[in-house]
Amino acid sequence: MAVQRTFSIIKPDATNRNLTGAINAKFEAAGLRIVAQKRIHLTKAQAGEFYAVHKERPFYDELCEFMSSAPIVAQVLEGEDAIAKNREVMGATNPAEAADGTIRKEFALSIGENSVHGSDAAETAAVEIAYFFSGLELVG
Ligand code: GDP
């Protein structure tokens, strides 16, 4: 296993409910190190660009509205096998299907308002990190 970096977002439903610290505690307990983090409020256009891969999906407009409805916390997580490990800690997209102890099982409100985003592969992680952070902001 290699040390990897992955991109994470704490979504508006979670920042609204003051869950940033509780979610960060889950990452850190799993051995993921937060090497960059910033709280920002995306415009709908910025959310749309980030989620462009989902443009044709029926929930795209709802997703962009939601992601720009309140602040998010954008993060870079680092650790052994960080991409897969983060997906494990997050749990399934639909909280009804998420395993016990996962972030989405504990905190998500619905399949759309599901508290966290995490990159699904090394290529997407690199693109997503670069969309939000400069190299100088990654402090391992
Ligand atoms: P993820 O990788 O687990 O985040 O899941 P996807 O890449 O499939 O979807 C991206 C995001 O779109 C999810 O995290 C949800 O916020 C949202 N989403 C996915 N499916 C649905 C859906 O059926 N309805 C709504 N409203 N949002 C959805």
Image: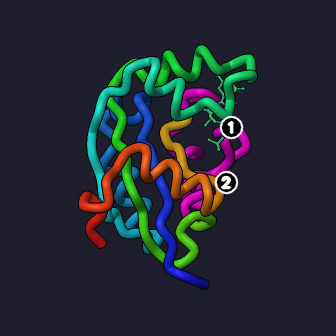
Colour pattern: rainbow
Residue 89: x %, y % from top left: 55, 59
| Magenta stretch, residue numbers | 86-113
Left or right for 11, reference 15: right
Side of 85 where 47 appears, left or right: left
Q: Which mark identifies residue 94?
A: 1
Residue kind at label 2, given as amino acid type: Ala
Residue at left offset 47%, top offset 66%: 5
Crowd band around label 2 with a 10 angstrom C-alpha radius: few (<14), some (14–19), many (20+): some
Number of marks drawn: 2
* Foreground disc of the pair 1, 2: 1
How far from the left and from the top, in percent, is residue 118? Answer: 54, 50
Question: Which residue occupies the foreground of this view, 100 or 119?
Answer: 119
In the rendered view, tell whether residue 10 sits above or below residue 81.
above
Seen at 61% across and 30% down, the residue is 52
Mark 1 residue type:
Asn
- What residue sits 68% from the left and 29% below the top? 54
Q: Tell me the quarter of the image containing the C terminus.
A: bottom left
In the rendered view, would you say 115 is above or below 56? below
Q: Which mark is residue 99?
A: 2
Quadrant holding ligand 1?
top right
Instruction: Establish if 61 lies above or below 95.
Output: above
Q: What's the residue at 42%, 62% (across, down)?
A: 77
